[in-house]
């Protein structure tokens, strides 16, 4: 029996952080044993916030190394780059033709940009359609997401249902897979850990960087247990293990931060060293990405050929 298909990815918009690991990467590695996994680098998505070519190239390579370092095995996982599969943007356009503006105006990213009075680029508005294409091209059974990203899967499901209703059964309806215990990963300020908030701890940080970030976490002098420090620590150790420590050291913020620093270093150091090994052979890493892109394109091309037939633009016989 064929394995069920899982699809996910991360934008190449900056350094991977521990939120990416605990919220997604760790689950991908675990699930690669039982799922046929397609994990991509969302470089076209990143373009809406990053227009620096050199930085983009560096980010793509760095994210590839991150994927390999956390244990994503190219023998079990198809690692690829979004821009290597042109069918993503082609299908996005077809979805645009059946999607109304009022529907997309309900999207969280667009509403958030409106509230902040940002100059909203079309890519921010249209982001959910490209994401729907990313997902539906590969007929995944599940798409692992955080609770805050559930809407993206709902939009992909709605889009698949609408297309199927207009043109006939074409797309599998994917299910979101939300790990309840890692639904939202806390950042150093208590909000969701995010590069856009500047509240992250890099996944491969050196010791001094870890120390600087943790010591800068703001603590409320009225707290016995510093909640932001504790929330991050709870990612590394279960509450049954660390809560008694925090209670016994209530108010001793420096000691608790020092303990968090040591635990973060113990967790990050092996990953950091593994990543440095992959860094020694960049051509090999890029060959893995290229091969993954070729495999992904085969799958996407087959689905796209079906879509072209369904919408009526396919007029040539092979």
Image (spheres, rainbow, N blue to C red):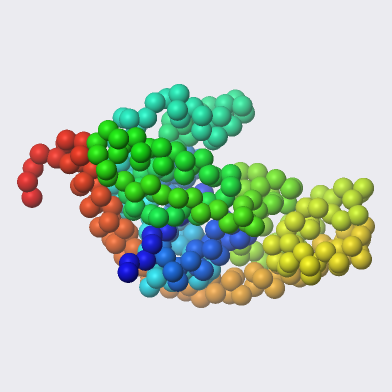
Give the residue at x 41% y 42%: 157
As drawn, which residue projects farthest toward the left? 317
Q: Is residue 10 above or below residue 287?
A: above
Q: Is residue 175 above or below residue 263?
A: above
Give the residue at x 77% y 64%: 239
At which x and y percent is residue 218? Answer: 81, 49
Give the residue at x 34% y 53%: 138
Residue 210's image quarter? bottom right
Q: Is residue 172 above or below residue 287?
A: above
Q: Would residue 152 appear left or right of 82 to someone viewing this image? A: right
Q: Is residue 118 above or below residue 56?
A: above
Residue 15's image quarter? bottom right
Q: Would residue 229 appear left or right of 1 to someone viewing this image? A: right
Q: Nearer the viewer, residue 21 or 269?
A: 21
At which x and y percent is residue 26? Answer: 56, 65
Quarter that holds the N terminus? bottom left
Can you see residue 102?
A: yes
Give the residue at x 28% y 52%: 300
Can you see residue 212?
A: no
Q: Nearer the viewer, residue 214 or 97?
A: 97
At which x and y percent is residue 293? Answer: 32, 59
At which x and y percent is residue 143? Answer: 46, 53
Q: Tally the marks.
A: 0
Q: Would residue 215 appear left or right of 135 to someone viewing this image? A: right
């Amino acid at each position: 029996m064929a394995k069920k298909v899982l699809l996910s990815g991360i934008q190449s918009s900056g350094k991977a952080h521990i939120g990416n690991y605990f919220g997604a990467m760790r689950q991908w590695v675990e699930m690669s044993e039982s799922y046929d996994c397609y994990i991509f680098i969302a470089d076209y998505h990143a373009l809406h916030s990053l227009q620096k070519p050199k930085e983009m190239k560096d980010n793509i390579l760095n994210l590839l190394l991150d994927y390999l370092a956390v244990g994503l095995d190219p023998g079990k996982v198809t690692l690829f780059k979004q821009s290597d599969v042109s069918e993503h943007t082609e299908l996005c356009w077809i979805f645009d033709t059946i999607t109304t503006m009022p529907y997309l105006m309900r999207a969280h990213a667009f509403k958030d940009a409106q509230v902040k009075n940002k100059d909203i680029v079309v890519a921010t508005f249209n982001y959910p359609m490209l994401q729907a294409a990313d997902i539906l091209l590969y007929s995944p059974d599940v798409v692992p997401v955080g609770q805050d990203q559930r809407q993206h899967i709902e939009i992909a499901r709605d889009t698949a249902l609408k297309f199927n209703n207009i043109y006939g059964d074409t797309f599998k309806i994917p299910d979101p897979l939300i790990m309840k215990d890692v639904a939202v990963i806390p950042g150093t300020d208590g909000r969701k850990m995010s590069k856009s908030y500047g509240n992250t701890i890099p996944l491969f940080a050196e010791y001094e960087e870890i120390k600087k970030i943790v010591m800068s976490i703001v603590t409320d002098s009225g707290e016995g247990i510093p909640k932001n420090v504790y929330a991050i620590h709870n990612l590394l150790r279960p509450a049954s293990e660390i809560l008694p420590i925090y209670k016994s050291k209530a108010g001793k913020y420096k000691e608790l931060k020092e303990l968090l620093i040591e635990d973060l270093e113990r967790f990050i150091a092996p990953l950091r060293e593994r990543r440095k090994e992959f860094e020694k052979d960049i051509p090999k890493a890029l060959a893995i990405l290229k091969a993954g892109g070729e495999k992904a394109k085969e799958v996407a091309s087959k689905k796209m050929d079906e879509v072209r037939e369904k919408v009526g633009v396919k007029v040539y016989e092979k």
